Image (tube, rainbow, N blue to C red):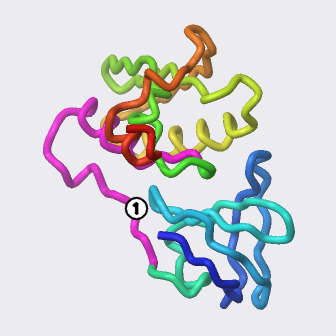
Amino acid sequence: MLKQDTIEVQRDCEATLIPSGVKVTLQKGSLVYITQALGNSYTVYVNGNLARVAGKDGDALNMIIMDDLDVNEMDGTAEDKVWELLKTCFDPEIPVNVVDLGLVYECKIDGGQVEIKMTLTAPGCGMGPVLIADVEQKIRGIREVTDVKIELVFEPPWNRSMMSDVAKLQLGML
């Protein structure tokens, strides 16, 4: 879902600058371009910056409101729910979720404790804080989860062979 035209923001709404993670307010009347609409959020280009707008604020962009997935309503273990939520986390610059990109190296669940080791597509990528915050916020929403620890690792270095075939197809690499 990519909207090529300039969109006028319909009401003030919160956004997160990419890659810094700094919270800002998009003012009513500001002009933005939507570059991506995935994972229950919109990525917009505004004043020379990329920013992420929560799906619940889609109306501010004259788009649909995207509700967050309520995994607490689905059947399955806490691990099933964690993996389902990880598939809703997207790099705002790449239209593929972190699981299919091969960025999640390890996910351990012990009682209510969730430990995730993940990486970035490049060590210098500034998206680390944004991705980690997104993953942590979503995982903390699972009833059975009492604590979340996310470790950003760079060994082994990520490479394209770690992507799923779905991701490769989506990015035109198959």
Percent coordinates x, y for residue 116 in the rendering: 47, 23
Task: Tell me: 61 left or right of 90.
Answer: right
Rendered residue at 78%/70% (across/down): 46
Residue 3's image quarter?
bottom right
Rendered residue at 37%/34% (across/down): 145
- At mark 1, the secondary structure is loop
Rendered residue at 71%/23% (across/down): 123
Percent coordinates x, y for residue 81 in the rendering: 28, 39
118 or 124: nearer the viewer:
124
Tell me where the magenta segment starts and ends, as one range: 65-91
Percent coordinates x, y for residue 15 in the rendering: 70, 65
Is the residue 138 above or below the residue 63 in the image? above
Q: Is residue 140 visible?
A: no
Q: Residues within 10 Å of mark 1 (few under 14, many from 20)?
A: some
Task: Tell me: 25 left or right of 1.
Answer: right
- Whether 95 is among the magenta residues is no
Task: Work out which quarter of the rendered image holds the C terminus and state it.
Answer: top left
Percent coordinates x, y for residue 101 in the rendering: 46, 34
Residue picked out by circle 1: 68
Amino acid type, residue under disc 1 in the picture: Asp
Q: Is residue 86 visible?
A: yes
